[in-house]
Image (tube, rainbow, N blue to C red):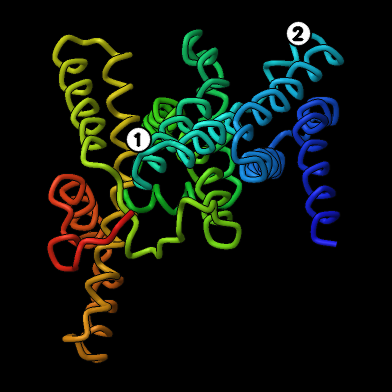
Amino acid sequence: MYISDQKTTNMLAILVLVAGPWLGVSKQAWGWTLDILLLLALLWVGRSDREHGLRFGTIFLFSGYGLAVLLNGFPSYTSFSFVPWAGLVTIWGMRAPITHRAVVFWSLVAAGVTGIIPTLGMLLQGVAQDSVQVLVQSLMDQYTQAGMLENLKSQGVTERELLTLFEQIANTMITLTPGLVALTSLAKWGAVYYFFVRWFPFPERAYQPFTEWRLPWYAVWGMNLAIASYLVGDLLQWLTVKHIGLNLMLVYGVVALILGSAIFVSFLKKPMLSVFVKFILLFASFLYIQVTAPVLIIMGLLDLVFDFRRRSTPKKKE
């Protein structure tokens, strides 16, 4: 009975990989749900066949995207999301002789890179200022209809100042679009990967709790690249290089925040801390979140090099 269920699940996964992209384009319904389903199906195929999982996963995924182009025409590729392809890196890493944290890092890199592919056209062509002005005017109309504009005027804020503020916000959001898209891609991959290692782990990789989440030391070079790109781009007025640095810093900031939070939680689990002290630390961290967040980010970045938790606990086999 188990073998029958296994075969049925395998066939369902293959069906999702082959037919999913075509349905997503045809029904104009390609979003979070389809990306997650494709990642789940791909990792399931990779997990089911130890020797040929990567090959079969590549073939079925490529066939699904090819079928979508064949049935919907070549221009349909603009509707694609390539985040599921990051699952191939994960399948390879699960069989490769590398550490668990290296598998996670390179899979995150793949998810981020594949996630921003659909935005490259917009970035290369640029965003028309007319579109920015339409967005700004829409925000102004909403403030006016809600009566908030009059309240701000009574506080000494002029309409021109508010208009300038909205323009700055719109331009900033457009500049950070690749980073925001990359973060959503990382979240999709992370959700699927956590589900797998928690309930359907690969034989070679054991589940690791949140307090053990780490990245390899060389991941810090990504942040170094981000800072260097921003500084060089700002100095030489190379906007593209500067924007690359800004987006990389945004992504690394969120990832470092998660790593720093893992360090903080592991510290709270120390037996030497009483329940009262733990409560005070948690309460203070939320009350002064504007201070806590930067501290956690710095801790997360430094952990890439110093690995604080390894210094306080016995080294575990990965």
Between 59 and 68, the one nearer to me in the picture: 59
Q: Quadrant for the C terminus, please.
A: bottom left
Reply above or below: 117 against 15: above
Q: Are marks 2 and 1 in contact (CB under 8 Å)?
A: no
Q: Quadrant for the N terminus, please.
A: bottom right
Position of 126 with respect to 315 (left or right) is right
**Label 1: how many residues lie within 10 Å, few (<14), some (14-19) or many (20+)?**
few
The residue depicted at 70 percent of the width and 43 percent of the height is 37
Between 261 and 153, the one nearer to me in the picture: 261
Residue 10 image point, x, y percent = 77, 44
**Image depth: mark 2 or mark 1 in front:** 2
Between 103 and 242, the one nearer to me in the picture: 103
Residue 2 placement: quadrant? bottom right
Q: Which residue is mark 1?
A: 161
Residue 266 placement: quadrant? bottom left
Q: Which residue is mark 2?
A: 74
Residue 135 image point, x, y percent = 55, 29
Is disc 1 placed on a helix, strand or loop? helix
